[in-house]
Amino acid sequence: MRRRIAAIALLMMIGAAPLAAQDAQNVAGTWNGTFTRGTGKEEFSMVITQDGEKVTGTLSSKVLSGVSKESKNVGKEREDVKVVGTYVGNKLSVKVGKQDSIEGTVVGDVLTGQAITTNGPPRVVSATKTK
């Protein structure tokens, strides 16, 4: 009886390995989306490459609208800011530049989460991967 259980367990583990590999998603590519906080909105494009769990790339953005004191930033652009982080399971975690970060969940070609900045509360992140 023990041998049967051990054999079944071994077969289940061997069979599960290919399924786990198939579930691993490649998030490399171009992600277009927005950061929003209140009435403030910033559009961005993030191009990332992936090597296993490690992701690297760049992010460019433009502020479309601001809230209160941030209204002075409308039209402000950032280009090719360095992005470094990880993609584990379905969780993307990247540092943007020296102080900002994005923490999100990827489902298919959609990223949702939040951006943590040094100047205010977190912003909502929503992006779609282009094909």
Image (cartoon, rainbow, N blue to C red):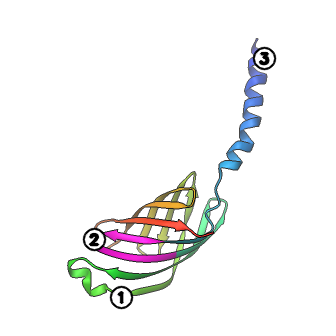
Q: Mark 3 highlights which residue?
A: 4
What label does residue 120 carry, if any? 2
Under mark 3, the amino acid is Arg
Under mark 1, the amino acid is Gly
What label does residue 25 carry, if any? none
Residue 44 in view in this figure: yes
Residue 119 in view in this figure: no
Q: In the depicted view, which residue is nearer to us: 110 or 92?
A: 110
Q: Mark 1 highlights which residue?
A: 75
Number of residues whose C-alpha sits closer than 10 Å to that of mark 2, classed few (under 14), some (14–19) or many (20 or more): few
For the residues labelled 1 and 2, the Cα–Cα distance comes to 19 Å
- Mark found first going from the N terminus, 3 or 1: 3
Secondary structure category for the residue under label 1: loop
Query: Residue pushed farthest front?
Result: 131
Number of residues whose C-alpha sits closer than 10 Å to that of mark 3, classed few (under 14), some (14–19) or many (20 or more): few
Under mark 2, the amino acid is Gly
Q: Residue at x 33, y 65 (%)?
A: 122
Is the residue under label 2 in contact with that under label 1 (CB below 8 Å)?
Answer: no
Tag in front: 3 or 1:
1
Q: Residue at x 59, y 70 (%)?
A: 130
- Mark found first going from the N terminus, 1 or 2: 1
Does the segment drawn in magenta span residue 12?
no
